[in-house]
Structures are given as C-alpha cells and as structure tokens.
Image: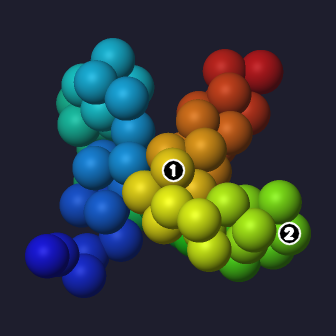
Amino acid sequence: MSFDAVDRFLTALDPTHRETVDGLPRAEQERLAAAWEEELERDTDIDTLDELSPPAAESEAARRVMERRSE
C-alpha cells in the first residue's frame, strides 16, 4: 500500500478521472491530492461513510474534488 497522497488519490478516482489526472503535471496532481485529503478530513458525511467503507469514502471525496475542478 502506497502512502503517497497522489497515488492514493489516483486509486480513489474512477478510471476516466484517473486517466485525466495521471496526464497532469505532478504539481497539479499534488494540488488535487491535497484538496482530496482536505475533503476527507473536513466532511462529516464522509467520516460516517469512512466508518462503513473507507474505499467508498475516498472515492466520494475524489469525485467531489474532480467535480469542483470542472466548475
């Protein structure tokens, strides 16, 4: 298991977003991974989901980060 935030973020993404983020410069990947970690830390709904299924919580946070990026 990788402890690198970018690797963990890429794993949490759906395949389409994973391919998109994988093609970005490393600095942008790190920015998105940091936003993803913030989303995981601050959202209480995700905290609850995390207790039930950590991978589902990580995927939900990744989806939210990518959704905001598209805005």
Q: Quadrant of residue 66?
A: top right
Q: CA distance from mark 2 to mark 1?
A: 14 Å
In the displayed structure, would residue 12 be above or below residue 42? above
Q: Residue 16: x and y, percent?
A: 33, 17
Image coordinates for residue 18, horizontal then vertical, percent: 30, 32
Count the marks: 2
Q: Position of residue 59 (x, y in %)?
A: 50, 46
What residue sits 37% from the left and 29% below the top?
14
Q: Amino acid at mark 1?
A: Ala
What residue would you read off at disc 1? 56
Q: Quadrant of the N terminus?
A: bottom left
Residue at 39% from the left image edge and 39% from the top image edge: 13
Look at 51% across and 61% down and name the residue there: 53
Residue type (three-letter) at the residue carrying disc 2: Thr
Is 28 drawn above or below residue 24 in the view shown? below
Disc 2 residue crowd, few under 14, some 14–19, many 20+, Cα 10 Å: few
Confirm whether residue 9 shows in the render: yes
Hey, which quadrant is residue 48 in on the image? bottom right
Q: Position of residue 32 (x, y in %)?
A: 52, 52
Is residue 55 shown left or right of residue 56? left
The residue identified by callout 2 is 44
Residue 31 showing in the rendered view: no
- Asked whether the beta carbons under mark 2 and mark 1 sit within 8 Å of each other, the answer is no
* Residue under the image location 25 percent in, 75 percent down: 4
Q: Quick one: quadrant of the C terminus? A: top right
Q: Tell me if residue 55 comes above or below residue 40 in the rendering.
A: above
- Say left or right for 65 vs 32: right
